[in-house]
Amino acid sequence: MSTSGTTSGAPLRRERLLGRFTHRLTRSQNQLEAEELRETTTAMGGTPICDVTDRELAQVCGTVRSVSLRPRADHVPALVVDLDDGSRSMQLVWLGRRRIAGIAPGSYLKANGRVCMRGGVPTMFNPAYELKAR
């Protein structure tokens, strides 16, 4: 009768737990939140924003960090949302909109559309979107 299989697993589990505990202690709160957000985004099937490329169709998920209204030429407003998925931020721009019900800082959404790079910032114009529960 061998008990080596049951006793060798316990130190390994303790080592993993200690490693996770140490990992959490050595990370800042912002780093931990970014890691958790990346895990949630991956679980929901979104492409990490850091991996999107110019002129690509993409589906991204993330947390709304800010919402602003920018006046445009010819008096056409634009609602601009900064979406963060833990890897990078992206701008979502809805032309002709002053607000969209449910989209506010802290809300979580999934957006689909074509990515364009504006000044090095990934941007989607008039994306299809879906509000999500976290």
Image (spheres, helix red, strand yellow):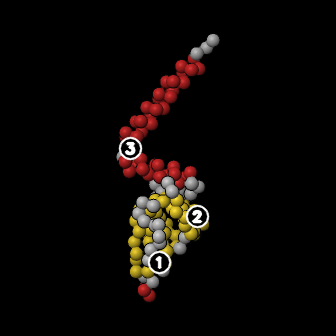
Q: Which label lies toward us, 2 or 1?
A: 1
Q: Label 1 to label 3, Cα distance in Å?
A: 39 Å
Relative vertical location of residue 97 with respect to residue 31 in this rendering, above or below? below
At label 2, the amino acid type is Ala
Q: Amino acid at mark 1?
A: Arg
Quarter of the image containing the N terminus?
A: top right
User: Can you identify the residue that label 1 sits on?
Assistant: 97
Of labels 3 and 2, earlier in sequence is 3
- Gap in Å between the C-alphas at discs 3 and 2? 30 Å
Query: What element does badge 2 sit on?
Result: strand
- Give the residue number, with chain letter if any, for mark 3: 27
Name the foreground residue: 51 vs 128: 128
- Residue 87 can be seen, yes or no: no
SS at mark 1 in the image: loop
Pointers 2 and 1 in contact (C-beta within 8 Å): no
Give the percent coordinates (x, y) of residue 106: 42, 60
Q: Secondary structure at mark 3?
A: loop
* Direction bottom: furthest residue: 74
In this view, the residue in front, 116 or 101, is 101
- Residue drawn at point x = 38 percent, y = 51 percent: 30
Label 1–label 3 contact, CB within 8 A: no
Residue 72 in which image quadrant: bottom left
Decide if residue 127 is in sight here.
yes
Task: Indicate whether 47 appears above or below 57.
Answer: above
Mark 1 vs 3, N-terminal side: 3
Disc 1 crowd, CA 10 A, few/some/many (<14, 14-19, 20+)? some
Q: Residue at x 61, y 14 (%)?
A: 2
Of marks 2 and 1, which one's residue comes earlier in the chain?
Answer: 2
Query: What residue is pinned by disc 2?
Result: 58
Residue 13 in the image, given as x and y percentages of width and height: 50, 28
Cα–Cα gap, marks 2 and 1: 22 Å
* Residue 84 image offset from top left, x and y in percent: 45, 59
